[in-house]
Image: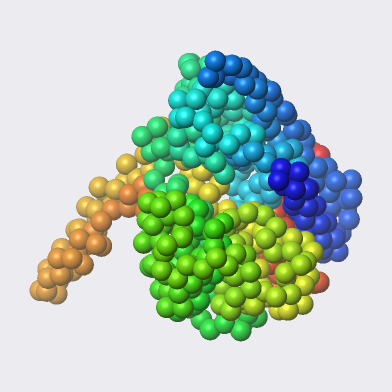
Amino acid sequence: MVSKKIMASDAFLNSIEVNFQKAVKCLQEAEGKEFLSSDLANQIMLANATYTVRFGVRLRGTMHTFIGYRSVHSDHFEPVKGGIRYDLAVNQGEVEALAALMTYKCALVEVPFGGSKGGLIINPRDWKEEELERITRRFAEELAKRDLIHPSQNVPAPDVGTGEREMAWMADEYRRLNPTDLNAWACVTGKPVSKGGIAGRTEATGRGVQYALRAFFDNEIDLKKTGLTSGLKGKRIIVQGLGNVGYHAALFLSVEDKALITHVLERDGAIINANGIDIHSLKQHILDKGSIKGYPGFTESGNEMLEADADILIPAAMELVITGKNASRIKTPLIIEAANGPVSSEADPILDEKGIIIIPDLYANAGGVTVSYFEWIKNLSRIRLGRLQKRAQEGQISQLVHGIENMTGKIFPNDFKESIIHGASEVDLVRSGLEDTMRSSYDVISHAWNTTKDVPNLRTAAMMVAVKRVVQSYSSLGI
């Protein structure tokens, strides 16, 4: 199983490099080789450094040795940024591929971080919570020794197998090792709000997927290429993976945009309901039963449901689920990559030929790193977002409402008055900043796609924008 995963990670890294080379070729034709030489392109593409750490922890009466990785793909901006995953299949190729994706993702959405990624070869479910804490703290200590956790050099975040709990342990361990560092809590993001985290971080990647789809559907030129009608209401959506990202994306799209989640694919089968699945109810069933089995509409069908008839496909689980083997059977006119690398480079031209539009991962799932950036800023400024202006905003709007009431002689309805007088809270500001980031980034990608010669799809356009910004950053450094 692990060896197959390693082969898949190599294919994942190869897919990213193939997409990078396509973007480089388009950039060189558009800007000239003086702007981006082949030597500079090669420097940008390769990881700067990958560190392997091995450490022992005495548990259950014996010494256990663990292996972890931290890859720094590009430090054209510091700190570098990227999650840490806990999984038995973690390997160097996978970490380097994800670190590269982080570089391009940050550049694309103009978050001033370089790209990094990390992982620990471990199955978290094999260990009790107190054991996992000791392992995590030792891992953090090994990384901190090498400045691979540091508020101004390398800032990890949660990923597969990790969450707020692990980030809190890591931040606390860094603070213990650096008791005089005023910015210690900024050494990681994705922390609990009570430990310097930010409201809206847990939902951020899924929320970003929702905002990305809204931006796409508001672009008449790009939407026309899919043949879909305007508006997300009533659109039939297949979601593969109901983890954190898939769940929040499906929840927001179904509840707020009135889309129909007709298929949910998980490891042990699928749920199908042509009238729309109640995502909150399904998630509660999974939490209660540990599986989707037994929920209404359950079928043992697996990833073949990716090929079902619908309007939008959201792969939100893992890389390389759509490959050269099944791409020709995909029916949805629109795919949005909520996961990292779910569509292989071999599948891309097949889907292009079929006229299927892909909203690429380096844009679509950038909500997490965007809100991590907001959290990092919050930690450095040491003040909750909205704390200084919330009441002032409420006071100004309240005076405006009273003025209108006095001028017109009419009274605002109480429920309406309460909603408009409400000042922006931290989560309101986070969502506003994220939506602005996703919408403005999409406009830039779409412009590159529609105005640059021989750009085949949104993926190449997004990569072009990202690489161009990395080149400009290198040039400003004299490289």
Give the image location of residue 20, x and y in percent.
Answer: 78, 55
The answer to whether residue 127 of the structure is visible from this angle is: yes
Q: How is the image coloured?
A: rainbow
Q: In which quarter of the image is residue 421?
A: bottom left
Number of numbered discs overlaid on the protein picture: 0
Give the image location of residue 280, x and y in percent.
Answer: 37, 60
* On screen, residue 175 above or below 392: above
Give the image location of residue 452, x and y in percent.
Answer: 76, 70
Query: Considering the image in quadrants, where does the C terminus appear?
Result: top right
* On screen, residue 41 above or below 143: below
Give whichever of 472, 261 is nearer the camera: 261
* On screen, residue 434 above or below 383: below
Q: Residue at 38%, 67% (x, y): give it.
A: 278
Q: Give the left or right position of residue 189, taking residue 315 as reference.
A: left
Q: Residue at 72%, 69% (x, y): give it.
A: 326
Q: Residue at 45%, 71% (x, y): give it.
A: 297
The answer to whether residue 206 of the structure is visible from this angle is: no
Give the image location of residue 370, x and y in percent.
Answer: 53, 49
Residue at the extreme left of the image, as rendered:
409
Q: Residue at 68%, 32% (x, y): give it.
A: 69
